[in-house]
Amino acid sequence: MIQPPEILRTAKTRVSCDGSGDIPAALGHPRVYLEIDEKGYVDCGYCDRRFILVGGPADGADQSTLPDIASGASVQ
């Protein structure tokens, strides 16, 4: 698997992403709200930014081995 472009650790299970960061928000993407589930992480469907729940099952794991999970998607 390919490493995601950016990884952000958070203490909240509900996060928002607008693609900004080093660029102005106007150059990002529409703001989306993402929910971290029992796997401990979620990926933004627009920019592939990965949000990891601090202390969750994905915190400290090798991120390159975890599948992409967009909010609302299910992994089998």
Image (cartoon, rainbow, N blue to C red):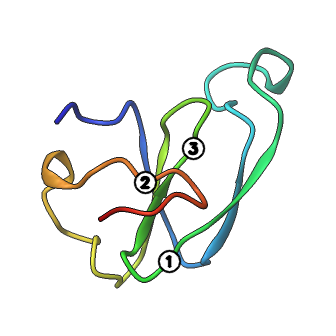
Q: What element carries label 3?
A: loop
Q: What element carries label 2?
A: loop
Query: Residue sitting at 75 percent across and 37 percent down?
Result: 18
Q: In the rendered structure, find residue 52 and report the number of the disc placed on it.
A: none
**Which three-letter amino acid code belongs to the residue tagged 2?**
Ile
Q: Marks 2 and 3, how far apart in space?
A: 8 Å
Q: In which quarter of the image is the C terminus?
A: bottom left
Kindly give the residue lying farthest to the front in the view shown. 76
Q: Name the residue under label 3.
A: 44
Q: Name the residue under label 1.
A: 37
The answer to whether residue 35 is above or below residue 4 is below
Kindly give the residue lying farthest to the top in the view shown. 27
Q: Which of marks 2 and 3 is in front?
A: 2
Contact flag, marks 2 and 1 (Cβ < 8 Å): yes
Q: What x and y, as percent, mark residue 58?
A: 28, 71
Query: Residue sitting at 61 percent across and 78 percent down?
Result: 12
Query: Residue sitting at 82 percent across and 41 percent down?
Result: 31
**Which three-letter amino acid code belongs to the residue tagged 3?**
Cys
Residue 52 falls in image quadrant: bottom left
Q: Which of marks 2 and 3 is nearer the N terminus?
A: 3
Q: Marks 2 and 1, how far apart in space?
A: 10 Å
Residue 6 falls in image quadrant: top left
**Which three-letter amino acid code belongs to the residue tagged 1?**
Asp
Q: What x and y, as percent, mark residue 61?
A: 16, 66
Q: Residues within 10 Å of mark 1 (few under 14, many from 20)?
A: some
Q: Earlier in the sequence, mark 3 or mark 1?
A: 1
Q: In the rendered structure, find residue 69 and report the number of the disc placed on it.
A: 2
Q: What element carries label 1?
A: loop
Q: Which of 34 and 24 is in front in this view?
A: 34
Q: In which quarter of the image is the N terminus?
A: top left
